[in-house]
Image (cartoon, coloured by chain):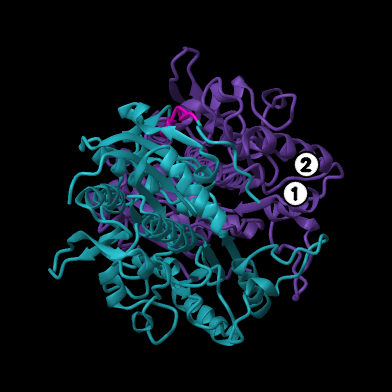
Chain colours: A purple, B cyan
Amino acid sequence: MSELAGNVLVGQSGGPTSVINASVAGVIAEALNHECIEEIYGTLNGVLGLLNEDFIDLAAESQQQIRALRHTPGAALGTCRYKLKKQQDFERVLEVFKAHNIRYFFYIGGNDSQDTADKISKLAQAQGYELRVIGVPKTIDNDLPVTDHCPGYGSVIKYLAATVREVACDSEAMGQGDLVSIIEVMGRSAGWIAAGAALAKRRDHPHDPPHLILLPEVPFNQEKVVADVSRVLKREKFCSIVVAEGLVDADGNYLAASTATDAFGHAQLGGAGDALAAIIEGSLPGVKVRVAKPGLIQRAAAHAASKTDSDEAFLAGQAAVRAAIRGETDKMVTFVRGQTEHYTCETGLAPLSDIANGVKLLPPEWINEDGVSMNFQFARYAQPLIQGESIVPHENGLPAFAQLQKTRVDKVLPPYEIV
Amino acid sequence: MSELAGNVLVGQSGGPTSVINASVAGVIAEALNHECIEEIYGTLNGVLGLLNEDFIDLAAESQQQIRALRHTPGAALGTCRYKLKKQQDFERVLEVFKAHNIRYFFYIGGNDSQDTADKISKLAQAQGYELRVIGVPKTIDNDLPVTDHCPGYGSVIKYLAATVREVACDSEAMGQGDLVSIIEVMGRSAGWIAAGAALAKRRDHPHDPPHLILLPEVPFNQEKVVADVSRVLKREKFCSIVVAEGLVDADGNYLAASTATDAFGHAQLGGAGDALAAIIEGSLPGVKVRVAKPGLIQRAAAHAASKTDSDEAFLAGQAAVRAAIRGETDKMVTFVRGQTEHYTCETGLAPLSDIANGVKLLPPEWINEDGVSMNFQFARYAQPLIQGESIVPHENGLPAFAQLQKTRVDKVLPPYEIV
């Protein structure tokens, strides 16, 4: 395969994670090693930047700032939830790529983003425009197929497991058989994140917090949960519950949706945690329930990120560039776990179309029969992903994050109207 | 003052903080230095242990565990919200003290706890039982009078300021002029905690997040807040709000109380954050609001504790023992800030009765005229309290906390019935 000379474009898409910027840093660090790569651009706000020609010059950023990306949460290039749909949009993207001689496109995101990358890649091929497109996985939801796991997942569950352990210290001190603490975590359709909180238990301490994990995979049964809580309160004096925001009842209705509407008619006041608290307080008189809902905090908690996760996110960015240089295209970087007893992880490649159309579910056989805890197979899978502590430099007592100067690349095309 | 030989009893009371155990460690470490001190006991669950003779032998704990207390959240001795009220309760406590030859009593807590300590001290004096009682301040609320600040406060605001900064990275990446993120923090009657989030702003960057801080001290004005949000969204593309749980309107009604009741008639479904979200979404069509409510997480976040705070909490425990050995009694340890430009802090003493009956309010002159931000005087006060990062040892990817073995001290009195 001959060397393809041209410019790199990297973009971020979907919800941020605490390590998605590490992948951008990996792309930049690796791209600098290859002479065939001329400019390294970033697209602002994902596909919006693709359509509007909103590019920045990443090679103009200082090395300190690029290094700082490795521990900066959010998405430094900006992201969006806008989806390219019309053929016209795709044509425009290709026109923009041609105008800026983009020959390497790296797109960091989840299923939808990989689908977008796939379509851009196929259109370029159809038009005979040589473009190498490599996706980089990203999602706290850990639901991309083929890859063993996704960058972002290890850090969110590390933060949540640490938080469960900390809050349990607090609740244990206060509990007199009457205290329930609920932590509502992300995860609308799958319980990967809630399951990760199980890592807070020490090995061979099944009675450690969290005492109950309520997964979207296990339909909510009010009587069983109340009985479980009651039993744990007697045994432990307090009860630690982790509930996925997407908890549903046997009919598939969100627990959250059962809460009352407010003065404006909004149904989403409070979530699964608040609804569960009301049920427990209503069923067990004298019991006090405290609800915590970390919300965006959990996916932005870079100060508590997993070093393994952060390093792997960086590695995925590097691997994407290397693959493209080798001539690969229309693929996503995957993680392949070694078969050894000690955790090892290498990168692989999978066709974008395999990623775009699949979802990886939490294996039901990793959930214990009690429906509220995870077995050793889950622990064996997840434990390696939270190892190591990412070091975030602090300034004046607080984490100091990258601030890109964002030198704009001149636009060369007429404006495009996004409808 | 002659040396008083006898046993030490230390207890914890009220809501835990991420550094209250550091004060216990300080008491133990210092007590070991004095030969006149024979046994070092801890009372389990504060006054409940005092009444029930539930004591543990702290000298029997390993040195590793005592050292680990310096970074363990919660309250390792257990705590309670029970208040001694009846004269009979106080008589019982003194009877228990005499039975175990307790001559030094150190009580770590807030206003109520210092009031209890004061009453126990005065009763001992009245009965001619020589007892030295020294209180150790503790409260994330930072509302104890006389002392410059309280152990626990620095860590909660360090965690929240870091969290505001992290979530802002996330929201900035997603915002297109339509994203509001709300973090609801503790603070029912005073805004000390919410104000602390202001430290997330870099010096001379008044437009940094948090963009709006809604304090209990400033009555909620719906029109003004909606206009503020709207203006920030135009300028910054996203809006970061910190709201104290105790936000009230001009009539003194909690904002939270305006939310609808649920099927069980509970009014407290959702809090100030959810209520504010409903107001903003109702007033600004197209705007999405994300609410995070760290709840207990914020006061248990030992992994992000302030080293200054943790060290001062330890120091306060040591100072309490030294003062008692010197013959002081019926006092609380206070923090006295040096008058130098660089922050220094020494311990002092104040009569327990001065603490028990006072409350320190957030100075209104530290709130900017806009009512939603803090001025340089607040920053000058609070910034030193969040300096330095407490190092928490990790095991298998998660913080490892102290696990006391809690060797029980034999009871010598007949049981007491708590009514």
Q: Chain of mark 2?
A: A
Q: Which mark is residue A226?
A: 2
A70 left or right of A12 in image: left
Instruction: Using the image, determine if residue B162 lies above or below residue A174.
Output: below
Q: Which residue is found at the position 31% from the left and 74% from the top?
A: B378
Label 2 packing within 10 angstroms: few (<14), some (14-19), many (20+): some
Q: Is residue B316 visible?
A: yes
Q: Nearer the viewer, residue A190 or A276?
A: A276
- Indicate the position of residue B401 as horizontal and vertical percent values: 42, 34
Q: Nearer the viewer, residue A331 or A226?
A: A226
- Indicate the position of residue A89 as horizontal and vertical percent values: 60, 59
**Do residues under tags 1 and 2 come within 8 Å of each other at their CB atoms?**
yes
Q: Which residues are magenta?
A: B397-410
Q: Which residue is found at the position 49% from the left and 82% from the top?
A: B218
* Residue type beneath disc 2: Val
* Residue type beneath disc 1: Ile
- Indicate the position of residue A142 as horizontal and vertical percent values: 58, 37
Instruction: Using the image, determine if residue A189 lies above or below residue B360.
Output: above
Q: Earlier in the sequence, mark 1 or mark 2?
A: 2
Provide the secondary structure element on which disc 1 rests: helix
Label 1 packing within 10 angstroms: few (<14), some (14-19), many (20+): many
Q: Chain of mark 1?
A: A
